[in-house]
Amino acid sequence: MIEKLNKNYYVIFFNAETKTTITYNHKQYKFVQTGIKTGYHELVNFYLGKRQQIYPTIIFLDTNFNEIFFLQSYISANDFLEII
């Protein structure tokens, strides 16, 4: 499975609670603190839109960064292989 991912995709793991500012598509996305130990990252909200923040979330994007697949669930390796 790792070989297939590495050969056919750019895989990015993103910690939705990172406090690092990310520049994406010429725009900066930052961590927004909502409490003493809570907050969210603006980049996560950009891709989730009005959907609920549930982990893990898997999003596949095309070469123009448009969403082509969205899943919020744990899945088995075999099920994941069927998707890709």
Image (cartoon, rainbow, N blue to C red):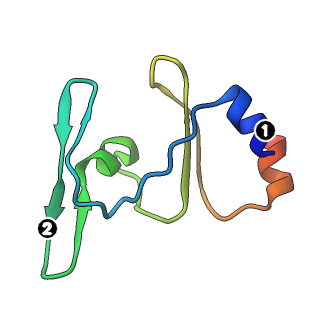
Q: Relative to 47, is 24 above or below?
A: above
Q: Which quarter of the figure has residue 18?
A: bottom left
Q: Is residue 40 left or right of residue 56?
A: left
At x 25% / y 62%, what residue is drawn? 40
Q: Relative to 19, is 28 above or below?
A: above
Q: Which residue is mark 2?
A: 33
Give neighbour class at mark 2: few <14, some 14-19, many 20+ (Cα, 10 Å).
few
Residue, far top: 64
Query: Considering the image in quadrants, where does the C terminus appear?
Result: top right
- On the image, the x and y values in percent for residue 22 come to 25, 42
At x 31% / y 42%, what residue is drawn? 46
Q: Secondary structure at mark 1?
A: helix
Q: Secondary structure at mark 2?
A: strand
| Total numbered labels | 2
Q: Which residue is mark 1?
A: 3
At x 77% / y 49%, what residue is drawn? 80
Query: Considering the image in quadrants, where does the N terminus appear?
Result: top right
Q: Amino acid at mark 1?
A: Glu
- Mark 2 or mark 1, which has the lower sequence index? 1
